[in-house]
Image (cartoon, grey):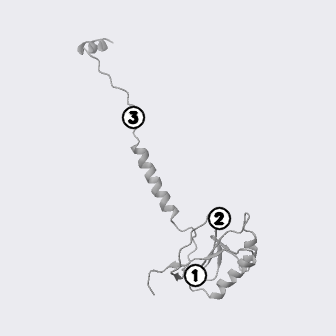
Amino acid sequence: MAMNLSSRRKGSKRTRRAAMAEINVTPLVDVMLVLLIIFMVTVTLPAVGVPVELPESRAAPVEEQPDQITISIDRQGTIYIEEDAVPAGGLPAALEALDRGGEPPLIVLRGDRSLDYGRVMQVMGELGRAGFTSISLVTEGSVSAP
């Protein structure tokens, strides 16, 4: 206590730090920018993980819809609904099990370029028979001129 008294006597004016009224938002902005970049990168990744070598086309791209269903046919002819393989002959039952909500969702059909045209048409026929009338065929964009 004697030390406190002597320190007060040395200086005639007491120096006191003013309270800081500002908030440093730089760390918050840094974190938000990193999260924004991560979000942008993950959104642009392909939604379906079935490896399919798509045929090339110069068709205009179609916008994705939130309720679309992706059906893929790989090189061996195996059918996938999203990422789940459909057993041979089980496509009609798998299509009936899909949640339609009210109106049939958009079907996005991805077929490997080495497939027989008849195999893709069989799948499209089953889709039509199940009541799915809005079908988009996915191709890879071509950059070469004719």
- Mark 2 residue type: Asp
Q: Nearer the viewer, residue 129 or 13?
A: 129
Residue at image mark 3: 22
Mark 3 and mark 1 lie on one chain; the one further toward the N terminus is: 3
- Mark 1 residue type: Asp
Secondary structure state at the residue bearing disc 2: loop
Residue at image mark 2: 67
Residue at image mark 1: 112
Mark 1 and mark 2 lie on one chain; the one further toward the N terminus is: 2
Secondary structure state at the residue bearing disc 3: loop
Percent position (x, y) of residue 66? Answer: 62, 63
Residue at 50% x, 81% y is 58
Percent position (x, y) of residue 122? Answer: 69, 84
* Residue 1 figure quarter: top left
Q: Quadrant of the C terminus?
A: bottom left
Please say if 43 is above or below 26. below
Q: CA distance from mark 3 to mark 1?
A: 59 Å
Figure label count? 3
Side of 26 where 87 appears, left or right? right
Q: Nearer the viewer, residue 132 or 97?
A: 132
Whether tag 3 and tag 2 are in contact, CB under 8 A, the answer is no
Percent position (x, y) of residue 23? Answer: 41, 36
Mark 2 neighbour density, 10 Å: few (under 14) some (14–19) many (20 or more): few
